[in-house]
Image (spheres, rainbow, N blue to C red):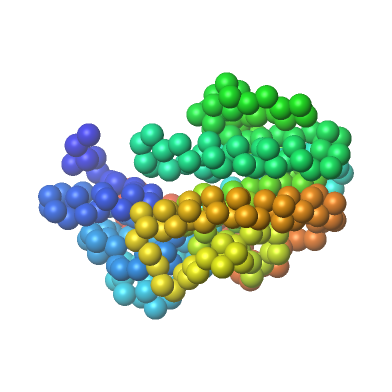
Amino acid sequence: MNIENYDLLINVMNLDVPKLQKHADLKIKSIFVDSLSWMWEDLLNGIDGYEIYFAQNKFIDQAKLLKYQNVQMINPIINTEGYRKNKNCNKNKILINFAGIITPYENDLFYREYLQFYLKLFLEIPNINQYKIICACNTLQETWIKENNNFDCTITFKVMTHKEFLSEACESSKIFSTPGLTFYLESMELGLRPYYLLPSNYSQALLLEKYSDNSDDCIKLSSYGYELSTDKLLQESRGVALVRQAFSEICENYSEKILNDISLYIDTDTSAKFKEDCPLKKESGEQEVVRIMYKKGLLNGG
């Protein structure tokens, strides 16, 4: 695709494109939308040539962002309109969110180890058959699970739209989820209280270290002796390798503790909301992006 055929490039989290644009001296108006600005140790190569660098206002590093001349901080980009926690939710319904286990690496089969560990663990939970378990997954995971596993309790695997997933979350009494950022923000807005599973990649591991300030229902790698710091970041490939090694070792050595923690969460009243350190404003992040782009003349031919 020749991006010079377009008038505007909206880049969401692709760090390679700005470098390519800078190297090729491509003249196209561009904006960058970043939800993990705190995670990059160095300034992003090529972003200084963009019209606007939008940084999501969550876990931000003010000193780092102020080095950008084109930065605009925006509210979290989420859409929970029309959804609220169902006070009369199904007390026997559990939602497990596996859909976030996606990596850009070709032929990456880590998701199999991850799913296998947790699904087998859930089968060991006392009286698990009294619960209806819904597992949100992607198409690749769904195919592999159905072809390679048989479960003797009620587990339904579903590939859901965002709306379907939020509806299930609001109707479930217990929610287990990989520690992705978007659902964390949605949960705060909706008053949900998920239990966060072990991380499947480096950014999730770092996010868990931050989530612990607002929730006790998460398993940080540092709790098991693995040193992770959001102030001293690793190269992405090394961070992923560390997280996966930690996952395998924790599963081997602490499966009983993990099972007990999950069982305790299921038996505990989790109706209390998260502590919000920065309440979300009425204008969503995407509304801010559009408003600012119009103001800058990027969406009206200016």
Relative placement, left or right, of 262 versus 136 is: right
Residue drawn at x 57%, y 21% as measured from the top left: 147
Residue drawn at x 66%, y 59% as measured from the top left: 218
Nearest to the observer: residue 229 or residue 183: 229
Location of residue 30 with respect to 1 vertically, above or below? below
Relative placement, left or right, of 8 versus 239 is: left
Image x and y of residue 131, in percent: 82, 36
Nearest to the observer: residue 39 or residue 155: 155
Query: What residue occupies the far left of the structure in this picture?
Result: 24
Residue drawn at x 73%, y 41% as measured from the top left: 122
Nearest to the observer: residue 38 or residue 106: 106
Image x and y of residue 233, in percent: 40, 67
Quarter occupied by the N terminus: top left
Relative placement, left or right, of 217 versus 286 is: right
Image x and y of residue 219, in percent: 64, 59
Q: Quadrant of residue 273?
A: bottom right
Total tally of numbered discs in the picture: 0
Query: What residue occupies the far bottom of the structure in this picture?
Result: 63
